[in-house]
Image: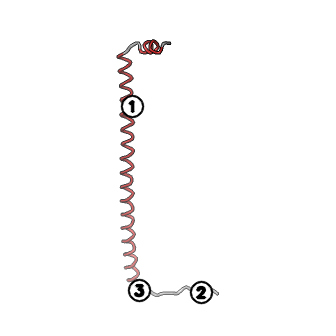
Amino acid sequence: MAEKVPIVIVNPDDYKEILLKLNDIEEKIEFTNSEIHQRYGKKLGRDIGILYGISTALTIVVVYLLLLLYVGVPNLQGLLMKLLGL
């Protein structure tokens, strides 16, 4: 047996007022949600920046040490061969 959907008659002014309230609530929810995502993005960006900084610093240190060893010991390969007994 098919049931009928109840029909309700509403004052158009009340209906518009309710729609405005619902729109305000929706805007507040969207704003809060965007603020939460923005904070998460800032945290993620900070973490990625720290990792890039560490990797860049380590690269600079390794290049500096390699240049220091190359300039400081011109015959590094021969010295290593003698130390290793090859």
Crowd tier of the residue under label 2, counting other residues whose Cα lies within 10 Å: few below 14, some 14–19, many 20 or above: few
Location of residue 11 with respect to 31 vertically, above or below: below
Q: Earlier in the sequence, mark 3 or mark 2?
A: 2
Badge 3 density bin: few <14, some 14–19, many ≥20, Cα 10 Å: few
Label 1: element kind: helix
Question: Which numbered mark, 1 or 2, is in the foreground of this view?
Answer: 1
CA gap, disc 1 and disc 2: 74 Å
Residue pictured at 35% horizontal, 16% vertical: 72
Number of marks in the rendered image: 3
Q: Nearer the viewer, residue 12 or 43?
A: 43
| Quarter of the image that includes the N terminus | bottom right
**Image colouring:** secondary structure
Q: Which residue in the structure is indicated by mark 2?
A: 3
Instruction: Give the x, y percent position of residue 17.
Output: 37, 79
Q: Disc 3 to disc 2, how far (Cα)?
A: 25 Å
Please identify, in this view, whether the residue under mark 3 or under mark 2 is nearer the observer.
2
The residue labelled by disc 1 is 59
Task: Report x, y in % for residue 52.
Answer: 39, 39
Q: Which residue is found at the position 36% from the left and 29% from the top?
A: 61
Closer mark to the observer between disc 3 and disc 1: 1
Q: Position of residue 40 (x, y in %)?
A: 38, 54
Tell me, for residue 11, which label it has, or none: 3
Q: Residue at x 47, y 15 (%)?
A: 84
Where disc 3 sits, the SS reads loop
**42 lies left or right of 77:** left
Q: Are marks 3 and 1 in contact (CB under 8 Å)?
A: no
Crowd band around label 1 with a 10 angstrom C-alpha radius: few (<14), some (14–19), many (20+): few
Q: Position of residue 16 (x, y in %)?
A: 39, 79
Question: Residue 49: which quarter of the image?
Answer: top left
Give the amino acid at mark 1.
Answer: Thr
Q: Amino acid at mark 3?
A: Asn
